[in-house]
Image (tube, rainbow, N blue to C red):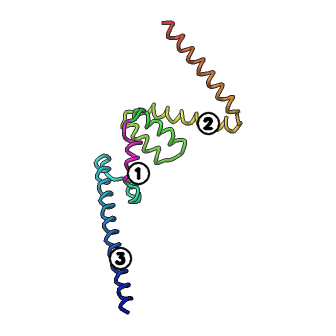
């Protein structure tokens, strides 16, 4: 009977220790969430619901990725990257993405004409993609024709430069 009680006591001790560890980890995760929220709020003025819905296990990584891809300056200037986002959002028919990228593009100086042009370009690309895929145009032939066309345009541009 004493052995059973010692066994029960060990189980209770393990449960208490595990509870303390779990509570400590939860506290650390909540601290991380709080710190991420502070950074988001500092940058955006509020914490959008889309970030609030992220699980504790990934909020920090998702925020870092969001900043790196959506906010930080890259090889493509932000204005043009957001115009690409407008076109992609139009193709995906995502009203959230369309609204976000349109408003952010405007923040970076995009005009209504540039936004319309980005959407028109996306529409044209999607239309041609549908057409040539639907007709199953031979891809190797397509690539050869595009390469020849680019070479012709390169040559034409060089001739125009030499005319001046």
Report the magenta stretch's main SS.
helix
Which residue occupies the foreground of this view, 45 or 154?
154
Residue for point 37% across, 48% down: 64
Local secondary structure at mark 1: helix
Residue for point 49% across, 32% down: 117
Q: Report the residue marked by disc 2.
A: 127
Residue found at the very far front of the displayed protein = 3
| Range of residues picked out in magenta | 60-73
Which quarter of the rendering shows the N terminus?
bottom left
Is residue 28 visible to us here?
yes
Q: Alpha-carbon neighbours of circle 3 within 10 Å: few (<14), some, or many (≥20)?
A: few
Q: Is residue 13 above or below residue 114?
A: below
Which residue occupies the foreground of this view, 110 or 10?
10
Is residue 53 visible to us here?
no
Q: Report the residue marked by disc 3.
A: 14
Q: Report the residue marked by disc 1.
A: 62
Q: Is residue 27 above or below residue 137?
A: below
Tell me which corner region of the image, top left, top right, bottom left or bottom right, holds residue 108: top left
| Residue contact at pointers 2 and 1, CB within 8 angstroms | no
Which tag is nearer the camera, tag 3 or tag 1? 3
Local secondary structure at mark 2: helix
Q: Earlier in the sequence, mark 2 or mark 1?
A: 1
- The answer to whether 43 appears left or right of 69 in the picture is left
Q: Alpha-carbon neighbours of circle 2 within 10 Å: few (<14), some, or many (≥20)?
A: few
Which tag is nearer the camera, tag 3 or tag 2? 3
């Amino acid at each position: 009977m004493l052995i059973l009680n010692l066994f029960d006591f060990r189980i209770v001790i393990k449960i208490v220790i595990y509870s303390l560890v779990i509570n400590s980890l939860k506290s650390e995760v909540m601290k991380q969430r709080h710190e991420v929220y502070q950074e988001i709020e500092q940058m955006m003025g509020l914490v959008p619901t889309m970030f609030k819905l992220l699980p504790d296990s990934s909020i920090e990584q998702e925020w870092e990725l969001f900043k790196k891809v959506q906010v930080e300056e890259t090889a493509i200037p932000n204005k043009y990257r957001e115009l690409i986002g407008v076109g992609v959002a139009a193709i995906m028919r995502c009203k959230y993405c369309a609204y976000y990228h349109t408003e952010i593009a405007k923040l970076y100086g995009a005009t209504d004409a540039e936004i319309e042009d980005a959407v028109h370009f996306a529409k044209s690309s999607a239309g041609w993609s549908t057409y040539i895929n639907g007709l199953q145009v031979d891809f190797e032939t397509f690539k050869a024709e595009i390469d020849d066309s680019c070479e012709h345009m390169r040559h034409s541009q060089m001739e125009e430069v030499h005319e001046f």
